[in-house]
Amino acid sequence: MDIPCNGPGTFVENITLNKELTLTGAGSGSNPATNTVFSASAPCGGIGISISAANVTVQNIYVTGYQEAVRLNGVNNPTINNMNLVDYCQYGVRISSTNSSIDITNTTIQRTSPMAGTVGIRVGTADAVNGMLISNSTITGNNLQGMVVFQSTTPVAFDNIIIQNSVISNNLQKGLYFEKLSNATLSGLVMNNNGTDPGYNNNNGIDINLKHNAYSNITIQDCDITNSAVMGTAVDPEAAAAITIKARDDAPSYNTIPASLNNVMIKNNRITGPQNGIRIGEYGKINATPTNVVLEGNDLSHVFANKTLISRINADINLDCNWHGTTNIPTIEATFTEAGTGMILLNDLLSTGGDGSANPGFQPTGNCACPSGFAIINTTTMVAYCDIQAALDASQPGEEIHITSGTGVGFFEVEYGKVLVVLNGVNFTSNGEICNNGIITVNAGGTFNNAGTYSGKGVFNGAFNNVAGGKVKPGGCGL
């Protein structure tokens, strides 16, 4: 059923839609002479439009002055299109109960002046969503978050989510905050000046803070996430970050019902902020996951007050073909910090920082190069690597990892059953601890310069040079 509003004008009422229909206004501008304006009868007066039936579309309406502009009450296939939800006193859109296939398109959700406690879109602890599209929309000016999604200790889903081609900026504490999220893509977003509250201790641009369930498949791609996350009242220098992603399993609050996350891709983004760029894991804690984390093709050249990348997890983070503002490896590595047993693996990097497009995000024009200076190959699988440790970790018993050419520095661990061969002409210098519980062979014509600490045995038909500062410890690692 299509129900056009009575043309332009101001309508002072609270609308409840409890049957399938399409409600169409004359336009979503603020001028009632040419647009349809829904206005509260008193400041912060109830809910502007409450939807409690499936297949409802509301479009082309300006909604202002309500406690909540729009509420979805456990419905399937609602559409909010070309709406202007302005100066609500609490929520622009509140999503309640169990909902599916939500579309929010071409819509502005905005506070034009500060008001305490305001949120653009809210999903509560017991509220579930399976399927949501936010596209070509704006969420701005909220004193708390642009979008907030909470999770219960009895978890429910927030699954199959696409947020794309939208502006989410100038939200005081966080741009986007999720405690539940799976099978989600955030793409083409312009997120500027989020997380700037001087009186708050957890400012972020994007905060994915997953709780009480198993989650997977999150992608952040082609976004500008800039000028976000000031320190505020935080004491820990790692607290504020433009992007932070963690699956909470840490004591004392989250170890009883631990969360986990697998498969995270952060690709082709431009990331800036005053304090930290990306933090994986909770500050002051160590988390087991996320696993399979890849950062690819991002512009990470901004000079942060603390760190570009923080790892506080027991899984590796793979860096592939990002621009770091330099190709100098010690300079790049000084912008990283690790806690837990996971490693930051600088697999390769961009040689220059050119951007091939004016669109949001970073579309690199430079070429990728191996940061180690070495050519490395698994002689069984014939897979090439830039990072020695990555090659060793991927190898299976009976396979050999060969450093075939190059001159450079590094450190690594050879686990039991792993084999590393340094070939003729290779000149390797250790700059950290070499733990050898497997087999290291330096062929004739190869050179191994130990400037760190070497633990374990080896077959040195080539040169083993214990250079200045080098130490050799007999036996295996830790002995």
Image (cartoon, helix red, strand yellow):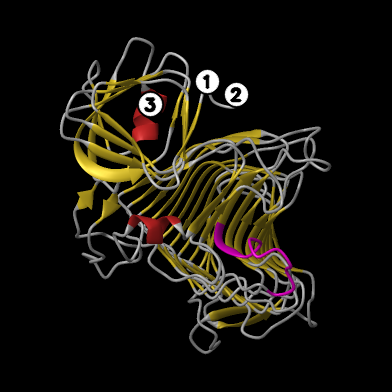
Q: CA–CA distance between discs 3 and 2?
A: 21 Å
* Amino acid found under the numbered disc labelled 2: Leu
SS for tag 3?
helix
Looking at the figure, which quarter contains the C terminus?
A: top right
Q: Nearer the viewer, residue 276 or 53?
A: 276
* Amino acid found under the numbered disc labelled 3: Leu
The residue under label 3 is: 392
Please name the residue shown 40% across and 18% down the image: 418
The earlier-in-sequence mark between 1 and 3 is 3
Residue 165 in percent (x, y) is at: 40, 62
In this picture, residue 207 sits left or right of residue 374: right
Q: Nearer the viewer, residue 454 or 51?
A: 454
Q: How many residues crowd mark 1 within 10 Å: few (<14), some (14–19), many (20+)?
A: some
Asked if the residues shown at circle 1 and circle 2 are in contact, with their CB atoms under 8 angstroms apart, the answer is: yes
Farthest residue, direction right: 252
Asked if the residues shown at circle 3 and circle 2 are in contact, with their CB atoms under 8 angstroms apart, the answer is: no
* Amino acid found under the numbered disc labelled 1: Gly
Please name the residue shown 67% across and 48% down the image: 179
Q: Is residue 332 magenta?
A: no
Q: What span is in magenta?
A: 232-243
Residue 252 in percent (x, y) is at: 84, 42
SS for tag 2?
loop
The earlier-in-sequence mark between 3 and 2 is 3
| Residue 246 badge | none
| Residue 475 badge | 1
Residue 259 in percent (x, y) is at: 68, 36
In this picture, residue 74 sits left or right of residue 187: right
Please name the residue shown 54% across and 74% down the image: 274
